[in-house]
């Protein structure tokens, strides 16, 4: 799954430039983003409108929900069931988004403790999760609450020893297709949600500091123990 991730200011700026977005939102580097918080997403609401970056609450509330309670708002959506689950079906067709990231965390159960791991691209470049967004209208306040979810897919070889799911990371060439409002059929969209190539990623065990969402600083990225050297560095956690 994906319940915590990292987004540096420089990464957001680089992605805004790549996607030709001239007015990105204000942002500061974050190291432990969690569901319920507001996060930047890239969306294109119609063919007549340009791409934009907005901040939405993480945890999707469908338009037909009785309330916007964050406790029942899913942070993740499984790629395999997007086209049929009522919570995600319409958003999958018409309200897709990109969720920029610098890295993400996943936990592996090890007896009574859970070891957190940080996943990043080997070259340090930012990337985008495939996401969905929705707007729920508050009947009392008369205002819309916009929310989002990160799509998950099957794990790649690097993730598989740690968890059976991973966020759907879009290849750069697929990002614009994902935002294309003319694409509404599952057959055009589901193939984009494949596991990201393991050979382009690295994974590092980090300290338990990241377990607490109140910790949101560079120390969340610190390795749990000295990393391996040379060619073994990207594979180090797999030999634990």
Image: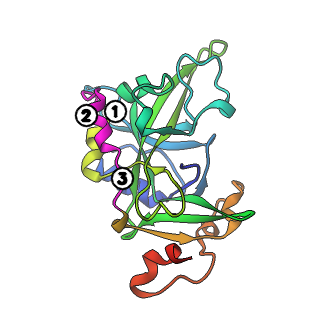
Q: Secondary structure at mark 2?
A: helix
Image quadrant of residue 69? top right
**Which stretch is magenta?**
181-197
**Image coords of residue 109 (percent x, y):** 65, 61
Disc sitting over residue 44 in the figure: 1
Mark 2 vs 1, N-terminal side: 1
Q: Secondary structure at mark 1?
A: loop
Say which residue label 2 marks: 188
- Residue 180 in view: no
Name the spot of residue 30 as percent of width and height, x first.
57, 57
224 vs 14: above or below: below
Left or right: residue 93 versus residue 101 is left
* Spatial CA span between label 1 and label 3: 15 Å
Marks 2, 1: nearer the viewer: 2
Q: At x 63% / y 12%, what residue is drawn?
A: 139
- Circles 2 and 1: CB atoms closer than 8 Å: no
Residue closer to the observer: 193 or 29? 193
In what element is the residue under mark 3? helix
Number of other residues with Cα within 10 Å of mark 1, as a class: few under 14, some 14 to 19, many 20 or more: many
Question: From mark 2 to mark 1, how far is it between C-alphas?
Answer: 17 Å
Please say whether residue 170 is visible from this viewpoint. Answer: yes
Instruction: Tell me which label, 2 or 3, sits earlier in the chain.
Output: 3
Could you classify mark 2 by the number of other residues whose Cα lies within 10 Å: few (under 14), some (14-19), or many (20 or more)? few
* Residue placed under numbered mark 3 in the picture: 15
């Amino acid at each position: 799954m994906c319940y915590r991730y990292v987004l540096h200011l420089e990464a957001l700026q680089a992605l805004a430039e790549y996607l030709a977005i001239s007015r990105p939102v204000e942002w500061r580097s974050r190291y432990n983003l969690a569901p319920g918080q507001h996060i930047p997403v890239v969306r294109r609401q119609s063919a007549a409108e340009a791409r934009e970056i907005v901040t939405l609450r993480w945890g999707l509330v469908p338009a037909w929900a009785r309330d916007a309670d964050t406790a029942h708002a899913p942070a993740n959506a499984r790629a395999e069931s997007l086209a049929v689950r009522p919570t995600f079906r319409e958003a999958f067709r018409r309200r897709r988004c990109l969720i920029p990231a610098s890295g993400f965390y996943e936990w592996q159960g090890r007896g009574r403790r859970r070891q957190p791991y940080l996943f990043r691209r080997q070259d340090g470049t930012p990337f985008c999760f495939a996401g969905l967004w929705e707007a729920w209208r508050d009947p009392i306040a008369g205002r819309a609450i916009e929310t989002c979810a990160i799509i998950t897919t099957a794990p790649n070889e690097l993730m598989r020893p740690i968890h059976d799911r991973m966020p759907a990371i879009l290849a750069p060439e697929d990002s614009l297709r994902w935002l294309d409002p003319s694409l509404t059929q599952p057959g055009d969209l589901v193939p984009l949600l494949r596991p990201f190539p393991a050979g382009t990623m690295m994974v590092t065990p980090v300290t338990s500091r990241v377990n607490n969402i109140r910790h949101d600083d560079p120390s969340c990225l610190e390795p749990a123990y000295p990393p391996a050297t040379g060619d073994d560095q990207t594979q180090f956690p797999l030999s634990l």
